[in-house]
Amino acid sequence: MTGRTARLGLAAVLLASAVAADAASAASPRNDSSHGAAFFSELLTGRVWLYERPNSARAEDRGTLWGSYYRPDGTVLSCVHLDGAWTALADRWRVVPSRRFRALYNYYKAGTAPDPAQVAGHVPIFHDPESGRLHTESLSPGNPPGAWFVLSHGWAQESWPRALKDACPGLGLPPDLPVNERQTSARMDEAIAQDPDAPVRALPGSELRAPGATGLALAGGGPTTTAAELARFLTVNDGTVLASPDGARLVLVLGPEKDELWRLDERGDVADVGWLLPSADGAGIVLQWERLPRKDRYRVGDPFPLLPTGERHAAMRLTDRIVARDRDVSLPFMDRGSVAFRFAAGGSVTARMDGGETVGGRWRWSRGSLHVALDGVRDVAAYPWRALAGRLGRTANGAAADPAE
């Protein structure tokens, strides 16, 4: 709803829009990558990823700068420090969608599929758009089993460090790849200090990140987000399309009494509606679907598994434009014939009746329809969004166009 005012219960009630978490999430939160596979492919292609392995077996390898250049043809050229010596490597790379982790970065052999057990380099990947930090995480094979640790951390940049140019002179990098003459140290901390502006920050699309998308290992076992951060995120994304790790498109719809999550079909119509309810123990939220035979749960503080897409749903764009135009909209209302409505931000509406009487009321979106209630009228009118868009399009210009477009 345009201009919706946040209420006191927002942080405690609205966190349920984390529908992608499954029933086991209360015991084991997901460790979804911070962005989708397409974003990471764009971030890395044609750029250099500088990183270190903080948990390398050899102490002398820790803190040593490694570098990889990602060619558009799917090959990666790397200069790494292993067993006390510099080594030049050529391999294949890709970032692929994952139903379990949203995106997996992995080296691979041609024709092989990503490994769901995240071995051989198939790991979740995380990017912080403000600092430019880029890191991967993996599951520990030892004790305790299932514990996440930081596999690599570093940043992406547009140039190849002088230190690595000297360490691996025969790597075969493109001749037009700039050499960063400032970065003369092969130590991680010194290289970033030599050119603190080198990391890629604020790449278009990097802002489309959910609260807590920092990685479980980086969080050190603590909460990755707060209820306040989630409340702000949900308020900003009221009426926008969110994406689940499995590719489902959903719309968060905050209401004055109940909050909903719409599951969209391929056309953008509402295929199912979920109701957001507090869990019995008060530690999270339960999402009760109307049609799907399941409940989804989310625990406050865990990574938020729904990513913003930056796309506002057409239904909400429709009322955005109606409110912005500040003009009467003629709609049928119950058995009263055509009524002239004037919609305002914040959910208020006035209606000019046939007899000239002006009546106040409220409007809101629910279950894919625009609901309008007038003061003193018991019944509530509901206008399905696509039918409403077609009607208003014909009214405006004589064509069945969607005025939200």
Image: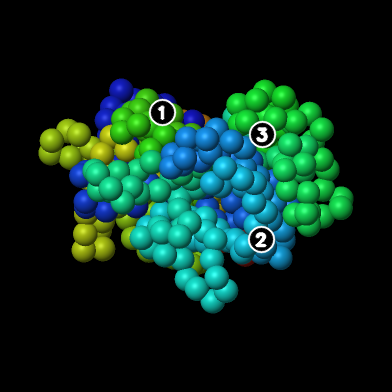
Residue occupying the point 57% across, 42% down? 84
**Dot 1 amino acid type:** Glu
**Dot 3 amino acid type:** Ala
Q: How is the image coloured?
A: rainbow
Q: Nearer the viewer, residue 147 or 264?
A: 147
Q: Can residue 292 be seen?
A: yes
Occupied quadrant, residue 16: top left
**Dot 2 amino acid type:** Ala
Task: Using residue 36 as the reference point, say whether residue 399 is left or right of it.
Answer: right
Q: Nearer the viewer, residue 100 or 116?
A: 116
Q: Earlier in the sequence, mark 3 or mark 1?
A: 3
Q: Which residue is mark 2?
A: 90
Q: Residues within 10 Å of mark 3 (few under 14, many from 20)?
A: many
Q: Residues within 10 Å of mark 1 (few under 14, many from 20)?
A: some
Q: Nearer the viewer, residue 249 or 41?
A: 41
In x, y percent, where is residue 154? 58, 37
Task: Using residue 246 as the reference point, say whether residue 312 is left or right of it.
Answer: right
Q: Residues within 10 Å of mark 2 (few under 14, many from 20)?
A: some
Could you tell me how far apart the alpha carbons at marks 2 and 1 are, in whole angstroms? Answer: 42 Å
* Rendered position, 148 above or below 398: above
Q: Which residue is mark 1?
A: 229
- Between tags 3 and 1, which lies in front? 3
Q: Residue furthest right?
A: 176
Residue occupying the point 41% across, 28% down? 229
Occupied quadrant, residue 256: top left
Q: Which residue is mark 3?
A: 186
Residue occupying the point 73% across, 48% down? 168
Could you tell me how far apart the alpha carbons at marks 2 and 3 are, in whole angstroms? Answer: 20 Å
